[in-house]
Amino acid sequence: MKTALTTLLCVGILIFSQPSSAEEETDLGNLSFEELVKVEVKSATFFDTDVKRAPGNVFVFDSLSLETLPVMRVGNIIDLVPGYIINTHQFQGDIIAVRGISTDNSAKTFVLLDGVSTNQRLHFGYQQSLKSPLFADIKQIEVIKGPGATLYGSGAINGFISMQRFDYKDVKGGKASYTYGLMDQLNRVEAQKGVEFGDQHGLYLYGGFAKSNGVAINGPIYGQPTDSNVHALAIPAPDYKISAKYVNHAFSLDNYFERTTYSVGNTALFASDSALFGPDGFGYVDKLIVNPKLTLRVDPKQSFEFSAPIEYMDFGAATRGSSAIPTPASPTNKGAAENSAGVKVIYRFEKLAETQNLAVGTSFTARNFEAAKNYFSGIDLHGTDNWQGMNGSWKEFALFAEDFIQVSKKLSIIAGLRFDKQVNGDFTSNYLSEIGFTGSIKPANTSSVTGRLAASYLANEQSTFKLSYQRGFRAPDANYYLHIGHFNQLLAQLGYSERMQQIQNEIMDSFELTYLFDFESKKSSLETSLYYNRYSNLIHYHDYTIDSLGMPTAAVNAVVAASGFMGQQANAPGTFGSVGFETIFRFKASEFMSSSGYLSYAFSRPTGVNSNINTYTGLTSSDHQTWALFPEHSIKGDYRISPTGKLTFDTTAIAYFGVKKLDSQSSDQTNYFDHPRVLVSINSIYQLLPSLSVNVLVSNVLNDKNPSPGENSAPANHAVDNDVGTTVYAGLDYHF
């Protein structure tokens, strides 16, 4: 295997290699505050906007940070953002939690790749790809805290993340890298190249491959026994990513394909699923995105942007035999697929009356769902719908506008408004047919009006104040309608007139005040944000046997007797949310050696959520634990230093503490939550030659095995990766 990987690396270098001169990279960490606030953020508004004017709170990772940070997966990067936490769920793996709000999936945070959504709409949002170790094609990551629905629609409710890839101008020549994991036997190869054909005409290519056997876990984890074959940090089947970006003046064509596999590694599972999520099973996600875009400039101030993104996604779980190759004939394989095609048009008028930028636009997307089907994996799903997938479609319409006004040299205002409508078709499911449901489900159409109003005031050369209100929303995912028709049919058959309610869009209103201060030295700065996020119609899985939500107890008991359960995604009554603040101190020193970094503290606390959550919001106790297991306090930092021109050290530290336990968590395993989780990682990079460097990355230096905040009171169910402790990786980078 190692020989094959070495050969692949050499072939990649031979194919891509040619003389070149790489452009100098911008280092955001080494910028002064005065320079930093002028860095343009591309995803916070419809216009490139500097940090001090962008609505909400923005955290940016540039290309140099992504090269030097001691991180191995996409989720490790996001985990460094103040106010963000990569939480865990025993069945769904890594999930994104933001500012005190953690549920059972990542669907409340919107993730974009070059402006195109990568969230699934069957269920889950963006989460499995958090485990991907392939991200060398990413030039910049912008993490925005707060809703972005006026820009991106459904799903941009509790923060959004924009990943922007390199193009041919950024990589003149190419780069190849190889990484090996000493503990988990990771083999990772990535190669990229930029080709310039002429003025404003070029092609960017990227390819990546990763495979890991993982680390065998022997013995109990947090008091629970494990199977001797459980492996943490495993990539059970190869991950790979291929992308190309073609640019020819006003036209661009983005093509991207990625497969991510993951091993959930649970220790407590339903017997029927043990083959899938135990040591012999793995989950997978395949994504294909094709996005042609054309920008037509009417005159120096006016332009039209046309894009037509197409997406295909597979996701599911499969078993494997004695080798790492999936066993196609396994009857327990599960899977579903979805695809979408859309059109988006944006008209931009810059420098309207010299002090105003105006953007208006519209979009249309047709989205289809197919159960027990895959487009790319080739895994035999036997035509069954055992992934609880759906067959159906809907159409998404949107109208939006945003106005940027420079009122004076000190004051600027951004106002935005958007209307979204989702028209649902009929849905069917073989899974429901197998359990006795006949007919189809016709969900009610949904619509939302969202807006934002943000102001930035430059008080003096050192101080800037930002104030914003933003509303976000999320329409129900397709899977959420799964059991409504089934249970309503049972209620009718059993003689009850009551029906389960249709699911409404969930909404979050966010209020935020930010203060930016630049110290006189221009080498350090302080940024502090206060926020209040209020949820209404929160969508969450609900168990009607715990709280009937007004349904007669006799009706619930009758449905349970007929079907074995009565649970479905539902809107929680009442409003609740989170309140908190974050502060970030950035610093820079260059008198003796180049160094830079940041240190942050974040506090968040849910509001309107307490131990009586069953009666207050109608959520189950397990749902309450999902919501509550978010650390009240977190400290994060990064320090990069280059003692010489050839040697660089980058150290990150994360500390979580203040996880609140519930009265219902009686297990002794919850004692582990009493202790802070502290993660320190170091990456050492040495430049052997102008075009060749080596690095050694040590993750979790302190060997901290305390569980990350999780989904329930049994940390062993979702903390297998934490039990590995310290891991070491060695890498080689070649620029040509």
Image (cartoon, grey):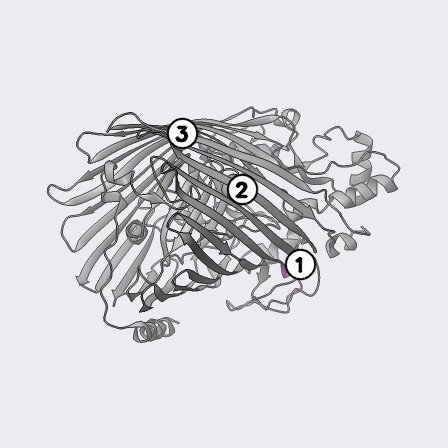
Question: Residue 649: where, in percent of width, then height?
Answer: 22, 49
Q: Secondary structure at mark 1?
A: strand
Q: Would you say the residues marked 1 and 2 are in contact, meaning their CB atoms lie under 8 Å apart?
A: no
Q: Along the polypeptide, which appears first: circle 2 or circle 3?
A: 2
Residue 332 picture quarter: bottom right
Q: Is residue 460 above or below residue 654?
A: above
Q: Which residue is mark 2?
A: 400
- Identify the residue at image location x=14%, y=42%: 590
Q: Which residue is mark 3?
A: 455
Can residue 249 be seen in the rendering of this structure? yes
Three-letter amino acid code of the residue under disc 3? Ala
Q: Which residues are magenta?
A: 331-335
Q: Secondary structure at mark 2?
A: strand
Q: Is residue 242 above or below residue 543?
A: below
Q: Which residue is mark 1?
A: 370
Mark pair 1, 2: CA separation: 30 Å
Could you say which is closer to the camera, residue 273 or residue 95?
95
- Identify the residue at image location x=45%, y=46%: 348
In the shown orientation, is residue 701 left or right of residue 710? left
Tell me, yes or no, whether the highlighted magenta stretch contains residue 129: no
In the shown orientation, is residue 25 left or right of residue 359? left
Can residue 106 be seen in the rendering of this structure? no
